[in-house]
Image (cartoon, rainbow, N blue to C red):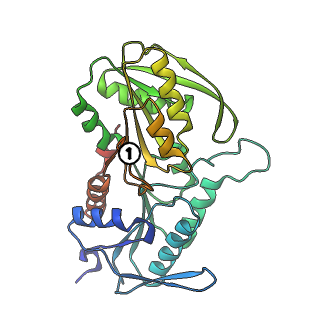
């Protein structure tokens, strides 16, 4: 049999097994077997327990903290390369270090570029991801990058809410493009929050550009970390006369006291995807799975079918 006709193999990094199982089920395949040996000093070694010679392999793993998650992906890519895999696709629903996409002050690293170089050096021949913090990160790679938009999975949910007087909001200036894309499909107004920071994750001042009085507002962002920005924005909008405030955030990092902040805030609902497993459930947090989207893209890549429709917000 020609290697081109061999079915692909799907493997999971340890931090993304639950999501990988969903993706494999949607794809119509079983997860491949990976065994990881752990040493007493913290070192670990993943090994494929089946042949992948001549196959396309999909390695599924988000690289959220800690850094072991990135290291595991790099080791699995290298192992696949040395096991003679034909194509190695790193499926990274959440691409970590993406906030370090430029030198915004002296003597700092451009972490996103470094991670891109590491993935390519390890042997990745293709990257799949969703809602990068900055679209231009795709340019850090010399390999094909399939960058999907989470709006594909979130917009149907928003339409089901049937909200009148809907307004889409961006929690900062950098997310205005995303907010305008949502508003275009929902035929809604847009407002933008302008914030100033004392330091990372600490907001000193926030102001609202636009009118939210009598509106049902949906904040959209690519990630939620500490929850400080979103909850402050939601409280500000309710003070300015909004009827309700919801939020859509693709990647639920939810570090520190984030979940507590959400539960105490004016937010009615936080809608997230499962690119990162929830550390703690909450009645205010609704998870919409990205598994069908990634399974569909993987099918199309395997069959060499265009995926351009998935690049449209």
User: Is residue 123 at all visible to an observer of this figure?
Assistant: no
Image height check: is 134 above or below 166? below
Q: Residue at x 48, y 76 (%)?
A: 76
Count residues near mark 1 (Cα–Cα under 10 Å), then give few for <14, some for 14-19, many for 20+: many
Q: Image check: 39 left or right of 93?
A: right
Image height check: is 268 above or below 129? above
Looking at this view, is 54 or 273 the one in front?
Answer: 273
- Disc tally is 1
Image height check: is 150 above or below 15? above
Residue 203 rendering spot, x and y as whole percentages: 64, 33
Locate the C terminus by quadrant. top left
Q: Image check: 21 left or right of 237?
A: left
| Quarter location, residue 247 | top left
User: Is residue 249 at all visible to an observer of this figure?
Assistant: yes
Residue 280 rendering spot, x and y as whole percentages: 43, 54
Looking at this view, is 207 or 77 the one in front?
Answer: 207
Reading the image, the residue beneath label 1 is: 272
């Amino acid at each position: 049999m020609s290697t081109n006709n061999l079915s692909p193999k799907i493997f999971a990094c340890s931090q993304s097994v639950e999501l990988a199982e969903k993706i494999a089920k949607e794809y119509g395949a079983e997860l491949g077997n990976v065994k990881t040996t752990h040493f007493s000093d913290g070192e670990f070694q993943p090994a494929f327990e089946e042949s992948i010679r001549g196959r396309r392999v999909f390695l599924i793993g988000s690289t959220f903290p800690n850094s072991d998650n990135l290291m595991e992906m790099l080791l699995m890519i290298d192992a696949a390369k040395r096991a003679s895999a034909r194509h190695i696709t790193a499926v990274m629903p959440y691409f970590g270090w993406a906030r370090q996409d430029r030198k915004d002050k002296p003597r700092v690293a451009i972490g996103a570029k470094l991670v891109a170089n590491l993935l390519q050096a390890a042997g990745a021949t293709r990257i799949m991801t969703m809602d990068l913090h900055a679209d231009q990160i795709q340019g850090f790679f010399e390999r094909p990058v399939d960058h999907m938009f989470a709006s594909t999975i979130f917009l149907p949910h928003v339409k089901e809410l049937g909200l009148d007087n809907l307004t889409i909001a961006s929690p900062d200036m950098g997310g205005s493009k995303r907010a305008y894309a949502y508003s275009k499909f929902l035929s809604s107004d847009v407002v933008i929050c302008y914030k100033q920071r004392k330091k990372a994750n600490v907001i000193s001042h926030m102001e609202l550009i636009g009118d939210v009085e009598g509106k049902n507002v949906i904040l959209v962002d690519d990630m939620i970390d500490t929850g400080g920005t979103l909850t402050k924005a939601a409280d500000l909008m309710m003070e300015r006369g909004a009827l309700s405030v919801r939020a859509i955030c693709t990647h639920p990092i939810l570090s520190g006291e984030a979940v507590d902040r959400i539960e105490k805030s004016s937010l009615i609902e936080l809608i997230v995807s499962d690119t990162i497993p929830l550390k703690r459930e909450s009645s205010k947090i609704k998870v919409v799975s990205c598994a069908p989207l990634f399974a569909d893209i993987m099918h199309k890549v395997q069959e060499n079918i265009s995926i351009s429709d998935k690049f449209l917000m």
